[in-house]
Image (tube, grey):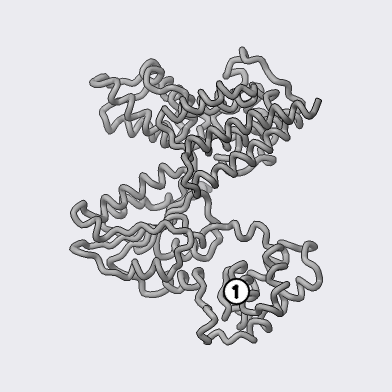
Amino acid sequence: MKQKLPNPPPNILREIQNDKVLPVYLLCGEENFLIEGTLKQMLDHLLTPETRDFNLTFLEDTNITIREILSQVDLYPVMSKWRVVVVRDAPFFKTQQRTVPITIIRNAFKIEITDLQKSISTMAKLLEVGVEQIAENHFDFTNAVNALIDELGAKLTDEERGFLERLPQIAEQLDTTAAGVDNTDDTALLLEWLQGDLPKSSVLIFTVRGAVNERNRVVKAIETVGRYRSFNPVEAGQSLNRDPLYKKVSDKFAEYGKQITPRAFSQLRDRTGGDMHTVAEAINKIVNFVGDKRQVDEQDVRNMVAQRTFDGIFDLTDAIGRRSIGQALKGLHEVLASGQEPIYVNIMIVRQFRFALQAKLIAERQGLRTFRSRMPLRDFTTNIFQPLAEEIRGLLPNSTTDNILKQNPYVAYKTFQSLNAFTVEELVAALEKALEVDIQLKTSTSDATSVLEQLICELCTASTERRSGAR
């Protein structure tokens, strides 16, 4: 019997073009370029340029509350059919708070006597339920707390387990109707709104960089009344016809009345690493370069697409590995001069150090030696990359963005060539420094270029000092 294939997800943009506009959307994933591109097209369809300023609100404060969001959604559009509220990186989609639940439980347990309200409020947020649901021993609470107990198992002491089991009795001591107790936390309030009478003239759009927990009750509620879409990096297919990026690139060139040859596409993918933002920029450059020429070939790609996105970052980290401050700073300035934003450059540095650490650990585990730089990419792909991807696929992160063996083989090819540039300890230290700089770039008013220059100098100096001390 032939298995029935699942229906493909509805096309959000096509639905909006056909006047099927839903009250809420959630766009998330690692490919922020695709998220922003989809958002732009949604806004272009929903709002006219003349009235956009009156009917479009962006909310980007990480401390934004649901009450503040809904107060904007409740406003009526001005001379327009729709009012649109866009909320970026809302905290209630993040899953970080559950990464160390045992610590949260212990903190709530410690303040049970001194601050009963805060203790219960903390547990309500961890379990993603309301205070009243805890007091009523609601099945949402019992399911959540039982799952948490199963998850932590032996990590829980008898006292902590007893604390979790008597949460309903503790919550009953609170007067949830009193003015001092806010029983409607953000999650509960948003769920109540999603399950109620939704507005007919407002559209609420959430965008989240990175993955969200698909089992989150808010995500499920949005799927019921709106649309949830995850945009993740486009992985290379086993063949050209099975490569989803090939179809996207071909369709984009077709919009300009052009075709790209298979070999030219392969080179485009290699030179951009498959990054959608870089691919889109490359297509625009190529189209402008070739003029009336209908077929895009390998030479066109070579002329217009330098391998600076990945190779530039690789050359930078390679110079750090050689402890050459001058070359590393030169590489940094060349990458910045290519038009890349400092925050993105640091993200790429973090990514490359993460890949280098994975390559180092894989090589030590598998007993691999640094191979000759003269080894052709094709031989590396067949004899090293593909066998590794199959043999240890369960040992690396599932995320395509964070797994070196889910990248284009060229990325792994360059990384494995420099296995001896760093020790494992140096790579871990470099990652920690680069992640600290990521926070600094996003929160500080310091000059971004100076911050990156300081990072490069510290990495080169720290590596040199560490090796000198080891002698």
| Quadrant holding the C terminus | top right
| In this rendering, position of residue 260 left or right of residue 147 | left
The vertical placement of 91 against 401, above or below, is below
Residue 264 horizontal/vertical position (percent): 41, 21
* Residue at the (35%, 52%) spot, across then down: 12
Q: Is residue 159 visible?
A: yes
Q: Amino acid at mark 1?
A: Ser
Q: How many marks?
A: 1
SS at badge 1? helix
Residue at position x 65%, y 74% in the image: 119
Residue occupied by mark 1: 121
Residue at the location (62% across, 40% down)? 433
Q: Residue at x 69, y 40 (%)?
A: 395
The location of residue 253, given as percent across then percent down, is 32, 30
Task: Pick whichever, 1 or 227, lies toward us.
Answer: 227
Dot 1: few (<14), some (14–19), or many (≥20) neighbours within 10 Å? many
- 111 and 22: which is toward the camera: 111
Q: Is residue 278 above or below residue 229?
A: above
Q: Can the viewer see residue 413?
A: no
Q: Is residue 227 left or right of residue 83?
A: right
Q: Quadrant of residue 379?
A: top right
Residue 76 coordinates in the image, percent (x, y): 26, 69
Q: Is residue 175 left or right of residue 145?
A: left
Q: Is residue 209 above or below residue 409?
A: below
Left or right of 238 in this view: 152: right
Image x and y of residue 16, in percent: 29, 54
Extreme residue in the top direction: 374
